[in-house]
Image (cartoon, rainbow, N blue to C red):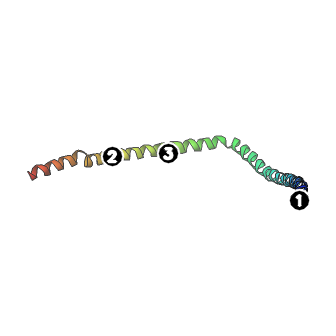
């Protein structure tokens, strides 16, 4: 019986000590995380300030890049269409005509 009584007391004491250690550890780690986050947030604020000043330049660069990409996409689409037409002639009617000619020659 004394084992059961000792178990309950030890369990409660262990839970109390574990809760206290967990609380202290959580407080220390949360402070470290908060301190580590402060420089990042100030850097982000500085980036936002610089982006406001250079926002128009950045917008112009993005627009130029977008137009350049649209031109390249149009060129690629044209090249794809050309190749598709060439392959269509090779795989489509031209092959059928060749196979019909060889079939006619076999007869």
Closest to the observer, 16 or 53:
16
Q: Secondary structure at mark 1?
A: helix
Point out the image quarter for the N terminus.
Answer: bottom right
Of tags 3 and 1, the one toward the viewer is 1
Residue 51 vertical position relative to residue 36 in the rendered view, above or below: above
- Label at residue 38: none
Residue that badge 3 annotates = 69
Please state the horizontal and vertical placement of residue 26, each as a whole percent of the image. 83, 52
Which mark's residue is nearer the viewer, 1 or 2?
1
Q: Position of residue 4 (x, y in %)?
A: 88, 56
What residue is shown with label 2?
84
Q: Earlier in the sequence, mark 3 or mark 1?
A: 1
Give the distance between the C-alpha atoms of the residues marked 1 and 2, in whole angstroms.
86 Å
32 lies left or right of 93? right
Quarter of the image where one finds residue 10: bottom right
Q: Which residue is mark 1?
A: 3
Compared to 20, does 68 lie above or below?
A: above
Residue 18 at what x, y percent from top left? Answer: 86, 55
Q: Position of residue 77 (x, y in %)?
A: 40, 44
Element under disc 2: helix
Residue located 61% across and 41% down the image: 59
Rendering quarter of residue 65: top right
Marks 2 and 3, how far apart in space? Answer: 22 Å
């Amino acid at each position: 019986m004394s084992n059961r009584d000792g178990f309950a007391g030890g369990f409660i004491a262990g839970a109390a000590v574990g809760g206290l250690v967990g609380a202290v550890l959580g407080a220390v780690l949360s402070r470290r995380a908060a301190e580590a986050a402060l420089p990042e947030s100030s850097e982000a604020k500085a980036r936002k300030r610089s982006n406001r000043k250079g926002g128009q330049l950045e917008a112009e660069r993005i627009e130029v890049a977008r137009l350049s990409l649209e031109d390249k996409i149009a060129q690629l689409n044209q090249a794809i269409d050309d190749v598709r037409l060439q392959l269509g002639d090779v795989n489509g009617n031209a092959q059928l005509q060749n196979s019909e000619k060889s079939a006619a020659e076999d007869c």
